[in-house]
Image (cartoon, rainbow, N blue to C red):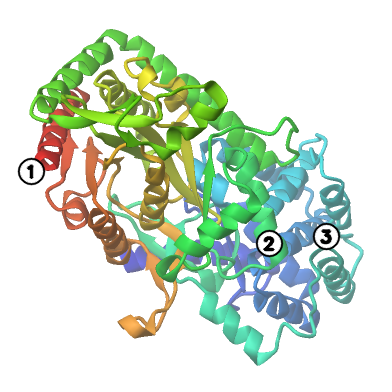
Amino acid sequence: MSEIDYSLSVRRRALNLIWTAAGEYGFEPEFLAFTQNGQPDLYMNSIIGYVRKWYAGPELNELFSTVGNALLRETFDGVVWIGLENCAYEREVKERPVLAELRHACAEEFFRQQMERSRQQWMAQNSLVYALQSARWNTVLGKAPGLVNPRERQLFKELAYSGDWNAAQIADHTYDILRRYFHFDRNTVHSSVFTRIRKMLADSSLHRLSGRVMRSEDLTFAQDASGAGLVTARKSKESGPLSAAGEENNRIYIEECFGLPLYGRQESARIDEALCTDRHTGCHLYFTEGKRSAAETNDALIRKTIRGAQAQAKKNRLHYQDRFHFYQNSIRRLAEQIQNALLVYPQPLKVPARTGKIAPERIWRAVQLNDERIFSDTFEEEQPDFSVDLMLDASASRLQSQEIIAAQAFVIAQSLRLCGIPVQVSSFLSLRGHTVIRLYQRYQAAEHFGKNISEHIFDYFAAGWNRDGLALRGAGFLMNESPAKNRMLILLTDASPNDDRRIPADRKNGHPLSRDYSGEAGIEDTRAEVRNLRKSGVQVMAVLTGEDGSTEAARKIYGDDFVRIESIRHLSDAVGTLLQRKIEQFTS
């Protein structure tokens, strides 16, 4: 079967379910329902048909059209269909008792799919709609809704649309809910200016279907390389400019998922103003050390994120312990190679002294500690005057390699530490417009050299997207704290930048329309940020592992300054050779 034939077949099966339930054939439904594996959803497509059967008319047509022009239409669609599912079920089950069994099976399938859903899928989905859907299917299974937030509990009660209502009552009640809970004004949403803005923000890029009722216009039907069905949904149209309330909700979500911010509100705003510009306008940088608030969150998605992170941290540590001797040997071998490179790196070492050149940063010691060594003297010593930042790609594309990546990072960082080289370790991912940079290990003073690197590195876990260019800007900001004159940045990456926030239009440089942050556009942005770091004196290199990542993309971004490691056994030799070459450049 050809791809075209297949795509028509998938769509036709969904249409047949809807037409059969509606008792009407040939019309084009505004909504279709698919499971996350691309198969037509039997129960929800039937519900779409029953809504047509019982409530067809101008009232619902106007409701769908009005909601369809809203900036938050994905949220509103989700809310509306939770209500419609209830009333259509109550109306139809009187004539078709078997529908109760289908509804029960749909509820069980919902929770089964949540277990199989990738972290990128369930973290990127709409938190409110997910909570309401979970509550509906919990009640179908005879359980408590599970909603903790009082506002969500009340909203869920109001979405129990009655099977005795007519279309006008459903529409009026829905408008009232949207007005009271979301400040939605149906009288302004159809203005031509507002409609144009929503269309300009529309993102035509595609991602894997998460499994829900979707507007037909937002679905694409195709066939993947293996011949399996592929139903894809457009990236969220809610990724444009948000209201202040929307931005705050996203900030709270990020904080509760990943930990308290490293910088206060004002400092964070200054960082965004300085770094989140041009290609990253509208995005945010969020720095954290992963420390969490003592208060427990009420959000089911956030709780799931935290549990997933904790489970992955255990897996990372167990993986390392199971291969402890192998990784200890890797540390020893890599440290030896670094030491060999340092033999050709004599640098003047500054030491505290009672005479010489005054050191302003030590004056406080004379006042507070009566320390007369407020001067500095220098002598030649085989002591490195450079630091290394190790940055780990933590996007969902790394889900299958988390234990390996955490172990590799620990090996590299510990080897550098044993050689007396200041090292800082972080990871990056992007979600809801925030590029989250998690610090596992900061630079430390000389008296701590030779001690073990922080085991917080094993808290590494992958989720979300990766806006590599903005992450590199964040890395440059963090490297301002380096105690060394020279700086290196090593990325453990697959060289595949991909974010759900688009690159804004740039007419001056020949881009009158916004673009996806992926493919060539993402590669070019990352390459530009690598160039900027190198101009500032930072040596930038990358490590690609296993089969992940594109060698061609890595070469475009990093030139010759990258290595691909096909096996963990080659880590020490490959990284050692790369570091030796870069260390030698400091001496030239």
Q: Amino acid at mark 2?
A: Gly
Up/down of 76 relative to 130, above or below: below
**Residue 55: percent from the left, percent from the top?**
79, 73
Res 14 → quadrant: bottom right
Q: Nearer the viewer, mark 1 or mark 3?
A: 1
For the residues labelled 2 and 1, the Cα–Cα distance comes to 52 Å
Q: SS class of the residue under badge 2?
A: helix
Q: Quadrant of the C terminus?
A: top left
Q: Quadrant of the N terminus?
A: bottom left
- Given residues 215 and 186, the one toward you in this image is 186
Query: Label for residue 353?
Result: none
Q: SS class of the residue under badge 3?
A: helix
1 or 3: tag closer to the N-terminus: 3
For the residues labelled 3 and 2, the Cα–Cα distance comes to 30 Å
The residue identified by callout 2 is 246
Query: Label for residue 87?
Result: 3
Whether residue 426 appears in this view of the structure is yes
Up/down of 204 relative to 311, above or below: below
Q: Amino acid at mark 3?
A: Cys
3 or 2: tag closer to the N-terminus: 3
The residue identified by callout 1 is 588
Disc 3 crowd rating (10 Å Cα; few below 14, some 14-19, many 20+) is many
